[in-house]
């Protein structure tokens, strides 16, 4: 996108086979005039659908970077950030819709709080349900408890602690991390910690980034005055088993970076636990979506 006026912020949209959602995402970004102008860059991870072609027809002014291969979310985010110049840059999933006023609400936080490194808006489903996008970096017991019970008992005490389910979603607060599906970042803070970690293909990269920002002295905040609608899993549902494996590998990577001293002896049992958990989840998915046998006639 070109403009005679310097952009007040930049938006990087990471796309992988998001279909028509990509156009919707870019359209809502442009429609939010509360903090215009915005510098928009779409980074496409070698999509095989027609999402990029449709975007070019609908919005020919939008700059598109084609990576040529699926680099993963972190590497694509870094590529898009490098192609922008604004002091505040946001990274989005392509299956998001940004509500009016969100740009101004998030930018105001950065303008008024020089120690703020990252911030995220309220995230809602298409049904209007609030998604817990602002969370703790979990303690070991919460990690194991949530990982074991979260799927069958979503409101267990470990998941409640990790997801901060008892916090008021209508009130802003400082948190450990916010979802990378929609995250605003101060460029100077991002540069200080070396950007997103390209070693994560998908998942946990947002936890890692906010954790490193916190260690470097930057604050992370949740700001519900801004909000987005996240359709969710538009791309990941195309390759569910690959995403399950990627998720568990990312969890192992973060544990290896975070655990020091005596905790490093836990890395081997953690790897075994994550491998077994991934197998259980893949097996459960296979059974859930197994074709039902056709009834036989007498």
Image (tube, grey):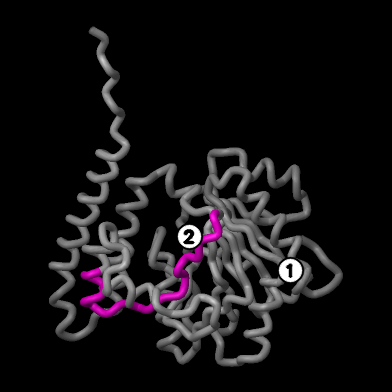
CB-based contact (under 8 Å), mark 2 and mark 1: no
| Left or right, 226 with reference to 273 | right
Residues in magenta? 127-145
Please say whether residue 190 is visible from this viewpoint.
no
Q: Quadrant of the C terminus?
A: top left
**Secondary element at image label 1:** strand
In the image, residue 103 sits, relative to residue 231, either above or below, namely: below
The residue under the point 57% across, 72% down is 121
| Left or right, 199 with reference to 2 | left
- Residue 221 location, x and y as percent? 52, 82
- Residue 141 location, x and y as percent? 21, 76
- Residue 231 location, x and y as percent? 54, 53
Residue found farthest to the front: 298
The residue under the point 61% across, 48% down is 21
The residue under the point 29% across, 27% down is 292
Residue 73 is marked as 2
Q: Quadrant of the N terminus?
A: bottom right
Between the residue at mark 2 and the residue at mark 1, the CA separation in whole angstroms equals 21 Å
Instruction: Pick the residue in front: 288 or 85.
Output: 288
Residue found farthest to the right: 4
Task: Count up the numbered dots.
Answer: 2
* Residue occupied by mark 1: 38
Inspect the magenta stretch and tell me whether residue 132 lies in it: yes
């Amino acid at each position: 996108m070109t403009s005679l006026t310097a952009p007040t912020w930049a938006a990087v949209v990471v796309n992988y086979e998001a279909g028509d959602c990509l156009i919707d995402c870019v359209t809502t970004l442009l429609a939010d005039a509360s903090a215009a102008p915005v510098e928009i860059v779409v980074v496409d991870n070698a999509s095989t659908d027609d999402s990029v072609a449709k975007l070019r027809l609908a919005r020919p002014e939008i700059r598109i970077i084609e990576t040529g291969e699926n680099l993963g979310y972190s590497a694509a985010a870094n590529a898009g950030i490098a192609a922008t110049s604004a002091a505040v840059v946001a990274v989005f999933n392509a299956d998001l819709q940004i509500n009016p006023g969100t740009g101004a609400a998030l930018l105001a936080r950065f303008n008024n709080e020089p120690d703020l490194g990252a911030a995220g808006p309220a995230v809602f489903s298409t049904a209007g349900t609030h998604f817990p996008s602002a969370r703790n970096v979990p303690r070991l017991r919460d990690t194991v408890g949530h990982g074991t019970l979260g799927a069958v008992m979503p409101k267990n005490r470990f998941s409640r602690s990790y997801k901060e389910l008892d916090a008021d979603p209508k009130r802003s607060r400082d948190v450990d991390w916010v979802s990378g599906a929609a995250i605003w970042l101060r460029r100077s803070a991002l540069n200080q910690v070396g950007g997103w970690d390209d070693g994560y293909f998908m998942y946990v990269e947002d936890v890692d980034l906010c954790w490193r920002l916190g260690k470097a002295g930057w604050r992370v905040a949740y700001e519900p005055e801004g909000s987005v609608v996240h359709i969710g899993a538009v791309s990941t549902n195309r390759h569910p088993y690959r995403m399950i494996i990627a998720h568990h590998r990312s969890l192992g990577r973060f544990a290896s970076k975070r655990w020091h001293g005596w905790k490093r002896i836990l890395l081997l049992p953690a790897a075994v636990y994550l491998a077994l958990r991934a197998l259980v989840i893949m097996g459960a998915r296979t059974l859930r979506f197994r074709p039902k046998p056709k009834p036989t006639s007498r």
